[in-house]
Image (cartoon, rainbow, N blue to C red):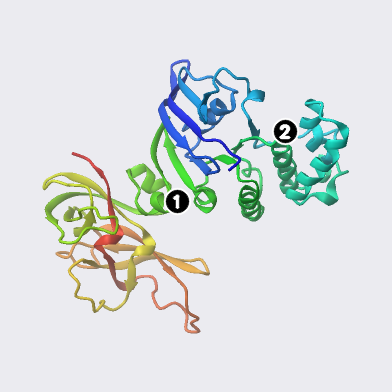
């Protein structure tokens, strides 16, 4: 593997009285595509700049493999950065922009040409070598910036929101290309983004950040399916999030797929009713917790589901608003407590996503104001935070 492990220990940073990073600890593995994900102002770009050497932390250590690099300037860290604004030289051709780092190192002329051609081929710009940046599209400019960053063969490539200036379709295309480039060269990529779809699409692991803290580190599957906090649940995809009090906790006979002990917890959610959820975290009766269930995990139907399984949650409601999106429909359903009428104005608004897998020439089978049943398994919900 050509990349380096990047180890961040106890890194903190303030600008004046404003604390940007709070004691960050991360280990990014050699050859990994690792994303720092969070909203604007969460500290992810500051952390990237500290790794690159453009900022110094107030406290902490940054190591590439077993070497502390904090005293090294950016050009001696075996890392390169791809910026959001490309940072190309407008007066140089594509060829000369990519060759610039080699010329700066006084690489022999006979070695420059084959190397530049190799990296232009890597980013699929062989036919654009003699163009100036103003003759290129946004995606082509970004590929030039990537080739220039890679030609020095760094062990770590740092990418600071590199696709944010591109339109949506081009961004998706470039994301695939970026993933393919990573697969080909095998070095460590550290990718900063506020776009959760980007991070979920290409990352081996993700660190979700907010207000200078790392809230959760895990694979895209772990981050999406098992969010560890309210914020992560809300920030990654869409979800339904409620507070409820635990009224009973029962240890299950069988452990989960990882061998951990599981508990069945019954929650009393004030605007919804009793909800069953399985968890590996011990919850005590009387504790208030945050509960989440993703919209696509919920089954919606106009007829009562036949299942008699004890781990199924079942509620009635009325479709408050259906939003058709071609491949799916999102329903906002007003769900009432069982003791109330399904048409009650009280209750909770629950989001449900139904994928369209079959052709229908009769139009949608569920419409506005329809009475519906909502159901989901206890295993498809999660307790994401214990409040007290």
Q: Which residue does the image show at 83% across and 36% down from the upper left?
A: 112
Q: Which residue does the image show at 63% across and 41% down from the upper left?
A: 162
Tell me if residue 202 can be seen: yes
Which quadrant of the figure has residue 18?
Answer: top left
Residue 305 location in percent, x, y? 26, 76
Which quadrant of the figure has residue 306?
Answer: bottom left
Q: Which residue is mark 1?
A: 220
Residue 16 location in percent, x, y? 47, 15
Residue 343 location in percent, x, y? 25, 67
Of mark 2 and mark 1, the one earlier in the sequence is 2
Label 1 neighbour load within 10 Å: few <14, some 14-19, many 20+: many
Compared across the picture, whether 260 is left or right of 154 comes to left
Q: Secondary structure at mark 1?
A: helix
Label placed on residue 87: 2
The image shows residue 92, relative to residue 15, as above or below, that is below
Between residue 336 and residue 17, name the one nearer to us.
17
Q: Nearer the viewer, mark 2 or mark 1?
A: 1
Q: Which residue does the image show at 29% across and 59% down from the upper left?
A: 257
Q: Secondary structure at mark 2?
A: loop
Residue 77 location in percent, x, y? 61, 26
Tell me if residue 123 can be seen: no
């Amino acid at each position: 593997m050509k990349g380096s492990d990047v180890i961040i220990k106890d890194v903190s940073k303030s600008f004046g009285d404003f604390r940007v990073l709070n004691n960050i600890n991360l280990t990014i593995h050699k050859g990994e595509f690792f994303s720092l994900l969070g909203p604007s102002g969460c500290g992810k770009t500051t952390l990237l700049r500290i790794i690159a050497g453009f900022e110094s932390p107030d406290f902490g250590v940054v190591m590439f493999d077993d070497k502390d690099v904090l005293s090294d300037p950016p050009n001696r860290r075996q890392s390169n950065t791809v910026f959001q604004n490309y940072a190309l030289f407008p007066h140089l051709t594509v060829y000369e922009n990519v060759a610039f780092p080699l010329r700066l190192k006084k690489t022999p002329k006979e070695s420059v040409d084959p190397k530049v051609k190799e990296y232009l081929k890597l980013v699929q710009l062989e036919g654009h070598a003699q163009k100036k940046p103003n003759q290129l599209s946004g995606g082509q400019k970004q590929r030039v910036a990537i080739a220039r960053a890679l030609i020095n063969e760094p062990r770590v490539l740092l990418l600071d929101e590199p696709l944010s200036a591109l339109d949506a379709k081009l961004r998706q295309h470039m994301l695939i290309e970026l993933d393919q480039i990573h697969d080909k060269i095998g070095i460590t990529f550290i990718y900063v983004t506020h776009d959760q779809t980007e991070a979920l699409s290409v990352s081996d692991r993700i660190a979700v950040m907010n207000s200078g803290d790392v809230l959760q580190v895990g694979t895209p599957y772990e981050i999406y399916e098992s969010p560890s906090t309210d914020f992560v649940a809300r920030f990654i995809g869409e979800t339904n999030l409620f507070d409820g009090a635990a009224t009973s906790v029962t240890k299950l006979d069988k452990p989960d797929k990882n061998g951990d002990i599981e508990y069945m917890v019954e929650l009393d959610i004030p605007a919804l009713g009793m909800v069953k959820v399985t968890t590996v975290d011990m919850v005590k009766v009387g504790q208030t917790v945050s509960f989440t269930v993703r919209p696509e995990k919920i089954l919606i139907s106009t007829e009562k589901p036949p299942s008699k399984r004890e781990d199924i949650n079942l509620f009635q409601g009325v479709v408050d608003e259906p939003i058709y999106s071609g491949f799916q429909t999102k329903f906002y359903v007003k769900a009432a407590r069982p003791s109330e009428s399904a048409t009650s104005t009280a209750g909770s608004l629950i989001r449900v996503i139904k994928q369209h897998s079959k052709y229908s020439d009769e139009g949608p089978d569920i419409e506005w104001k329809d009475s519906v049943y909502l159901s989901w398994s206890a295993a498809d919900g999660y307790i994401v935070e214990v409040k007290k």
